[in-house]
Every structure is written in structure tokens, then in C-alpha cells.
Amino acid sequence: MYKLDRTAFYMGKAKEESVRQAFYWHDKTPQERLKVLYYLLCEVYGFEDGRIPSMDRAKFSMRKHT
């Protein structure tokens, strides 16, 4: 879905980069930001095609406390 554009990055001072990043993300809509956040979470946790695996209920059980 997304492709890393290595030409879009450059070495700069940390302060300049943080300001530049802030302007970049402020131009995006909240929906665009959430879409990118979801994509990054799927990449980090290794979910394939954005499909979150279901919870294995055999590992967890619920007991009523009396």
C-alpha cells in the first residue's frame, strides 16, 4: 500500500526536522493520520493485510468470583 521514498529524507538538525514533521502532519486530515497509524501498527505487530488475528480463547478463561 505504501512505499518508502528514500529521496524524501535528508539529514538535518533535530529542531528543524521536528518543525518540518509537525507542518507535514498538520496538513493531513485526521482520517489520513489514523490510516497511517493503523498501517504502522500492522507493520510493527506483523499483521498480514491489516487483518488482526482473533484472540485464542483457549489461553484465557473467565471465572465468576463468588
Image (spheres, rainbow, N blue to C red):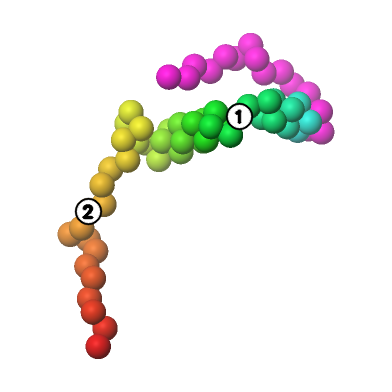
Instruction: Kindly identify which residue carries mark 1.
Output: 29
Query: Furthest-top residue in view?
Result: 7
User: How dense is the environment of label 1, judged by Cα within 10 Å: few (below 14), some, or many (20 and up)?
Assistant: few
- In the rendered structure, which amino acid carries the disc numbered 2? Asp
Disc marking residue 3: none
Question: Is residue 35 rendered to the left or right of residue 57?
Answer: right
Query: Furthest-bottom residue in view?
Result: 66
Residue at x 78%, y 31% (from the top left corner)? 19
Q: Position of residue 4 (x, y in %)?
A: 53, 18
The N terminus sits in image quarter? top left
| Residues rendered magenta in the picture | 1-16
Q: Earlier in the sequence, mark 2 or mark 1?
A: 1
| Corner quadrant of residue 52 | top left
Disc marking residue 56: 2
**Residue 43 part of the magenta segment:** no
Question: Vertical placement of 10 versus 32: above or below?
Answer: above
Q: Nearer the viewer, residue 26 or 50?
A: 26
- Secondary structure state at the residue bearing disc 1: loop
Question: Is residue 16 rendered to the left or right of residue 54?
Answer: right
Q: Position of residue 7 (x, y in %)?
A: 63, 11
Query: Furthest-left residue in view?
Result: 58
One can see residue 46 in this view: yes
- Measure the alpha-carbon separation of dots 2 and 1: 35 Å
Q: Position of residue 53 (x, y in %)?
A: 28, 43
The C terminus sits in image quarter? bottom left
**Residue 4 part of the magenta segment:** yes
Residue at x 74%, y 27% (from the top left corner)? 23
Number of numbered callouts drawn: 2
User: How dense is the environment of label 2, judged by Cα within 10 Å: few (below 14), some, or many (20 and up)?
Assistant: few
Question: Is residue 50 rendered to the left or right of residue 40?
Answer: left
